[in-house]
Amino acid sequence: MSAPIHIDNITCAYDSHTVVESLSFTMNSGDICCLLGPSGCGKTTVLRAIAGFQPLLAGNITIQGKSLSALNHTVPPEKRRVGMVFQDYALFPHLSVCDNITFGLRNKTALEKERVCNEMLSLVKLKDLGHRFPHELSGGQQQRVALARSLAPEPDLLLLDEPFSSLDVDLRRSLALEVREILKSRNISAIIVTHDQEEAFAIADRIGVINFGHIQQWDTPFNLYHEPATRFVADFIGQGVFLPGQAITQNSVSTELGEISGNRCYDWLPKTPVDVLLRPDDVIHDDSSQSRAEVVNKIFAGTSTLYTLRLPTGSLIESAFPSHHDYNIGDRVGIRIEADHLIAFL
């Protein structure tokens, strides 16, 4: 049975440069969580600390109530019951798929290894490929072997470091869903590191958005998109632009597109200048609207077209229109705002 993990105020540094500072989160048994953020924000350092490859300057890491890392105490990586899937797969090129999968099962008999290998091959849908070598497999198949090898010892926690980054976009999305299904079927707790938010949304129950070594928000994908806690999260997650406005009440703002209200209450005073985040799905195409905007850019995406629109003041916003509407650069279109979630910052 996989176990919850507690990260309590950990701090990590390389030489004198602090990379992660006072970072905390807790995840439940069987959860798939994600550390999401831009390159260099510290997310891989957190993963390395959990795996036992990176010492702590402060804080504590525990699984099943057992301390794995503290300032003067570190359990070796091989004794943590933590599996890891590396970005480059790290398969042994001279070993077959089966031998790669069973490499970490040193205390098992040959018969037990064969049973585990067959179970893992079936789990990752590589049932007839156990005799092959890594160079004979595609990138997606190699990733499945790396996952099977990490799951074979039945770890308490699985760590995945940018596991799909070398794959093409379509394969990355489909494999992320497959990995989620595999982990959920075995109730495996997992933490994945990525800078790709679509990948994070596809696989994770909860996501920690990290910037400069701090978690900005630890939440569900839905809340990160609709209820961002900071301007960084609002700007980093999803698409959208900030439109200047002025507070009317604690849950309404006046903008050049009219009054925008929502489900949030803020502690600002009337007439306070604020910036309102408008997502493309907040801006609705409406030929009957008196609010008009000029098309300055368009990106066709199949079921919808993402338009960049210029308002009379020169402000730019984005809107996703159904693709059966086809406007050209320079056209003026009618729009209205339909935003259930008021997201605004001073």
Image (spheres, rainbow, N blue to C red):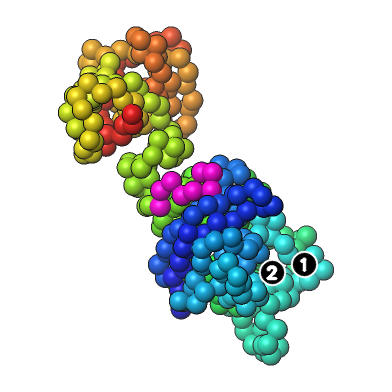
Percent of width and height locating residue 306: 43, 26
Q: Relative to 137, is 277 on the left or the right?
A: left
Q: Is residue 114 above or below residue 241?
A: below
Q: Is mark 1 on a helix, strand or loop?
A: loop
Magenta segment, principal secondary structure? strand
Q: Which mark is residue 262?
A: none
Q: Is residue 131 above or below residue 317?
A: below
Q: What stretch is highlighted in magenta?
A: 211-218
- Please state which amino acid type lies under the numbered disc 2: Leu
Residue 153 appears at what percent x and percent y? 60, 78
Residue 281 coordinates in the image, percent (x, y): 34, 32
Q: Is residue 111 left or right of residue 284?
A: right
| Residue receiving disc 1 | 92
Q: In which quarter of the image is the C terminus?
A: top left
Q: Quadrant of residue 140?
A: bottom right
Label drawn at residue 129? 2
Residue under the image location 45 percent in, 76 percent down: 65
Q: What element carries label 2?
A: loop
Which residue ends up furthest to the right in the rendered image? 94
Q: In the figure, 82 relative to 175: above or below?
A: below
Camera-side mark, 2 or 1: 1
In front: 186, or 234?
A: 234
Identity of the residue drawn at 42% across and 63% down:
26
